[in-house]
Amino acid sequence: MVAKVIGIKKERASVTLSIKSVSEERRRDALQTWKNEQRASQIMRVAAERIGWDEGKTTAVSEEMRDAFGSLFGALEECAITESALEDAGFEGDWIRTVTELAIENIVPPFVEIRGLFEIKVWGPEGVKAISGALQAAEDCADGEEEVTLTCHYDGAPNYRVDIKAPDYPSAESVWEAAQEAASKKIGAVEGSIVIERL
């Protein structure tokens, strides 16, 4: 049951609730949020067993994750989307790998993100045109893929960040492989080099 608080009387220690004031959509959202938090707590209990944490440590880390992400489920969903989410939020330790693996196994995110880095150097007269062509070839790899986007960003010469957003990891990884091959082929045709790193 979901109810809306319509009045609080502190002196009497009473709370007035209204069931009618809650729309069906809000009721569904509240129940889904509650279910998600229960599921996230269960995932953290499994992680604690694998890591060897006691209940106090599990609760403390879960609270830190809630503070950083707004909810425990939100934290785990971010882990399922971006594998480095906990590190990016300032968390440290070997436990991160276990929690992230469990999140990826148990939570289907609305999308996933992966990131790579191209370090491109061109010595020949083609210069900027060759680099631009390699990045465009990489971006073109996502064309025709349903709900997959690939964008290249300049991070200061000679580094170019590659961001891929997809509905699932296999789709993202497939586009990443194709992008590496396409960019390497373009740079291989000129006087230059490309070093590729998965971030």
Image: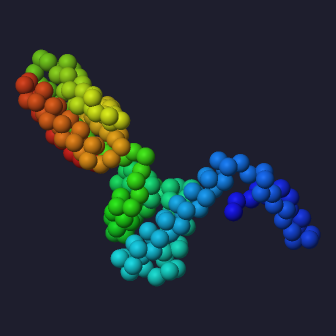
Q: Is residue 5 above or below residue 122?
A: below
Residue 9 or 82: which is nearer the viewer?
Answer: 9
Looking at the image, which residue is at 50% across and 80% down? 55
Q: Which quadrant is the N terminus positioned in?
A: bottom right
Q: Residue at x 74, y 59 (%)?
A: 3
Q: How many marks?
A: 0
99 vs 153, nearest the viewer: 99
Can residue 66 be seen? no
- Which quadrant would residue 99 be assigned to in this image? bottom left
Q: Position of residue 52 (x, y in %)?
A: 38, 80
Figure colour scheme: rainbow
Tell me residue 191's x, y (percent): 7, 26
Compared across the picture, whether 60 is left or right of 85 comes to right
Q: Is residue 40 visible?
A: yes
Residue 99 lies, with reference to residue 48, above or below; the image says above
Residue at image x 52%, y 79%? 56
Image point (55%, 62%), residue name: 35
Left or right of 64 on screen, residue 15: right
Q: Which quadrant would residue 98 be assigned to in this image?
A: bottom left
The spot of residue 181 in percent (x, y) is 14, 36
Percent across and percent down for residue 42 are 47, 71
**Is residue 139 rendered to the left or right of residue 110?**
left
Give the camera-side residue of 168 and 24. 24
